[in-house]
């Protein structure tokens, strides 16, 4: 669910960045303002997604736990478990 929220927020951010860039370039009367706005929007989308995933997913697991799978000892199955 977290990744869908990140992607949604990145899309909203990039669309807002597109219109802001287009508005600023329109005030400066630059040519190719749609191209530049699209380029800035795509770069902004990529940067937002990268930083959001790094920020929100950096501590989403605890690497100090080790998994011991179930084992077969004397014909009986010993349950697996997590240990520190």
Image (cartoon, grey):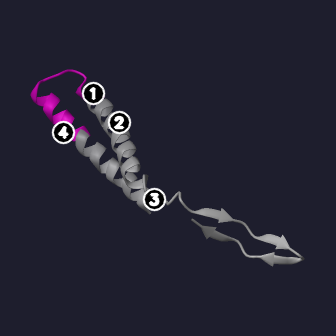
Q: Which quarter of the picture shows residue 79?
A: bottom right
Q: Which residue is mark 3?
A: 60
Q: Which residue is mark 1?
A: 36
The answer to which of marks 2 and 3 sits earlier in the sequence is 2
**Circles 2 and 1 in contact, beta carbons < 8 Å:** no
Few, some or many residues within 10 Å of mark 2 (<14, 14–19, 20+): some
| Residue depicted at 42% across the width and 52% down the height | 58
Q: Residue 73 in the image: state x and y as whole percent.
A: 85, 73
**Circles 2 and 3 in contact, beta carbons < 8 Å:** no
Q: Secondary structure at mark 3?
A: loop
Q: Which residues are magenta?
A: 18-35
Which quarter shows the N terminus? bottom left
Which of these two is toward me, 20 or 82?
A: 82
| Picture layout, residue 25 above or below residue 55 | above
The answer to which of marks 3 and 4 sits earlier in the sequence is 4
Q: Which residue is mark 2?
A: 42
Which of these two is toward me, 52 or 71?
A: 71
- Depth check, mark 2 against mark 1: the one in front is 2
């Amino acid at each position: 669910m977290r990744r869908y929220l990140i992607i949604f927020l990145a899309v909203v951010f990039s669309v807002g960045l597109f219109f802001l860039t287009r508005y600023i370039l329109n005030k400066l009367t630059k040519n190719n303002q749609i191209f530049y706005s699209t380029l800035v929007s795509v770069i902004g989308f990529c940067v937002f997604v990268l930083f959001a995933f790094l920020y929100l997913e950096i501590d989403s697991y605890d690497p100090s736990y080790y998994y011991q799978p179930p084992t077969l000892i004397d014909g009986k199955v010993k349950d697996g478990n997590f240990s520190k």
